Amino acid sequence: MSNKKELNDNLEISLAYEKLFMPEFFSIENNYTLDKAFAISNEKLDEVFKHIDLKGKSVLTVGSSGDQALNCILNGSKDITIIDANIFTRPFIEYKIAAIKTFDYDTFSDVFIKNDFFSWKVYSKISHLLSKNVQMFWDTLILDINEDSYSYEFSAKTIKEKMLFVDHRDRHSLFYTSKSIYNKLQSALNNEDINISFVASLFQDFPKALNKKYDLIYLSNIYDYYKGEEAELFEATIDKLYKKHLKDNGIIIANYSFNKSIKDAPKQLGKHMLEHKEVTRFSEGEKNKDTICFIKKKSKINKQYKKS
Ligand SMILES: C[S@@+](CC[C@H](N)C(=O)[O-])C[C@H]1O[C@@H](n2cnc3c(N)ncnc32)[C@H](O)[C@@H]1O
């Protein structure tokens, strides 16, 4: 009982617990963060990905709520690598995907928005779809903690509070608000051969944690976390990703700049010129302008052709 109490108190999670249940995340020392994961993205992702045809394309994206990856799937990608330093992202994203695969739109909306997303009732229907380690993580949280004196609501609520930053006011991805888009996503997840892999890494270590090239690299607003002297580290890492992990004609979305119109957004990142696309995001009825800043890699053939 006292162990269980300790476990509950340290849900943001004690090193021993992490090492015990999710060893693959901790093979690289300190290569993680313990921030809460976003339950729903606050980025206007349907607008961001709307103009990018991802059919047959491979994507590298930060994890966060999983919404970035899910929008890529809706736009045709079947090869997605999710990379994040936050240890909560993988268990949460796998849980969300398993729930989308399992529940119809109304049930998903109902359980996801309500507190019982992490209840035994929900978990028992989706757990078989989780990877082994993630299943072990949730088995411990949901089954063991619910077992004795902890009330079911208390632990479901605790999981939510400790693990997630939850803001359900604005659901910017269409599959949350449109039944037909949800069904399209569910069908893709259930019927198409989609490969989703997870990598745990801090941003500056992304280049060495990866071993392939991508058509699209989506970095959310990690840039905003790299201020002052650290900006150079961000720029150097972007350059390595560009050289080692971006295919010809590929795109790095280097930053999603909140509340910035194109004229206020950065024009250059290290040695790379940025291109821009402005998106409109309504939040609580208010209209906001955000700008995505991206780098395009021209194909070598095109470059040679231009020279001759
Ligand atoms: C930049 S955050 C912002 C949340 C975002 N606006 C959304 O829609 O979810 C997105 C993800 O980046 C991850 N992240 C932030 N800084 C990181 C870093 N230095 N290295 C690796 N991942 C990082 C966070 O863990 C989070 O899951």
Image (cartoon, grey):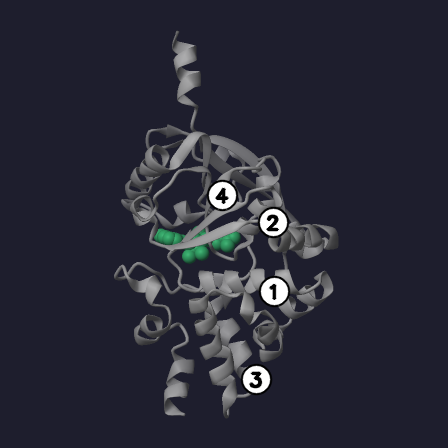
Q: Residue at x 42, y 68 (%)?
A: 133
The percent coordinates of residue 286 (x first, y second) are 65, 50
The residue that mark 4 highlights is 256
Instruction: Tell which of 21 and 85 is nearer to you.
Output: 21
Q: Which residue is mark 3?
A: 152
Q: Residues within 10 Å of mark 3 (few under 14, many from 20)?
A: some
Q: Nearer the viewer, mark 3 or mark 2?
A: 2
Cβ atoms under marks 2 and 4 closer than 8 Å: no
Disc 4 marks a residue whose amino acid type is: Tyr
77 horizontally vs 2: left or right = right
Q: Which residue is mark 2?
A: 192
Q: Earlier in the sequence, mark 3 or mark 2?
A: 3
Residue 5, given in percent of the width and then of the height, sits at: 41, 87
Which one is earlier in the sequence, the residue at label 4 or at label 1? 1
Q: CA distance from mark 3 to mark 4?
A: 38 Å
Quick one: SS at disc 4? strand
Q: Residue at x 68, y 54 (%)?
A: 182
Q: Nearer the viewer, mark 2 or mark 4?
A: 2
For label 4, count other residues whose C-alpha is less than 10 Å away and answer few (under 14), some (14-19) or many (20+).
many
238 vs 296: above or below: below
Q: Give the percent coordinates (x, y) of residue 129.
A: 55, 65
What kind of element bears circle 1?
helix
Q: Amino acid at mark 3?
A: Tyr
